[in-house]
Amino acid sequence: MSETKVVDVHQSRIAAFLRSLDPAVLSVLQIGEAEIIGIDLIVSLCITMTDAGDSRHWSERLEDFASQIPEGELETLELVTRSW
């Protein structure tokens, strides 16, 4: 049986940095919460998939990653992508 590894999907430094910016700056850059969530998910996924210390098959890593994404984040992304 493979070992389950907890993956934290919302701890990227880029997301923390973006959230720390003044709202006026984010507005000028046209970066909202949905874009920050999307960037954060991509960065976190890349970190998870390239973790040399995790010996599990890539599909197990991906499954664990996906299972830990808060539903609210996916709903935010879905609403924004529908408006594009």
Image: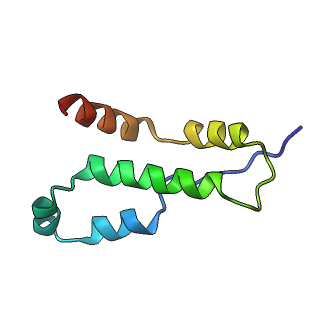
On the picture, is 25 further left or further right than 52? left
Q: Residue at x 65, y 57 (%)?
A: 50
**Foreground: 55 or 70?**
55
User: Can you tell which quarter of the image residue 24 is in?
Assistant: bottom left
44 shown above or below 1: below
Q: Is the C terminus in the top left, top right, bottom left or bottom right quadrant? A: top left
Q: Give the x, y percent position of residue 28.
A: 10, 63
Query: Looking at the image, which residue is at 72% across and 50% down?
Result: 5
* Looking at the image, residue 13 lies above or below residue 9: below
32 with respect to 17 (left or right)? left
The N terminus - image quarter: top right
Figure check: 67 above or below 31: above
Q: In the drawing, does residue 25 fall left or right of residue 10?
A: left
Taking 51 as reference, is 46 left or right?
Answer: left
Structure colour scheme: rainbow
Q: Residue at x 37, y 48 (%)?
A: 38
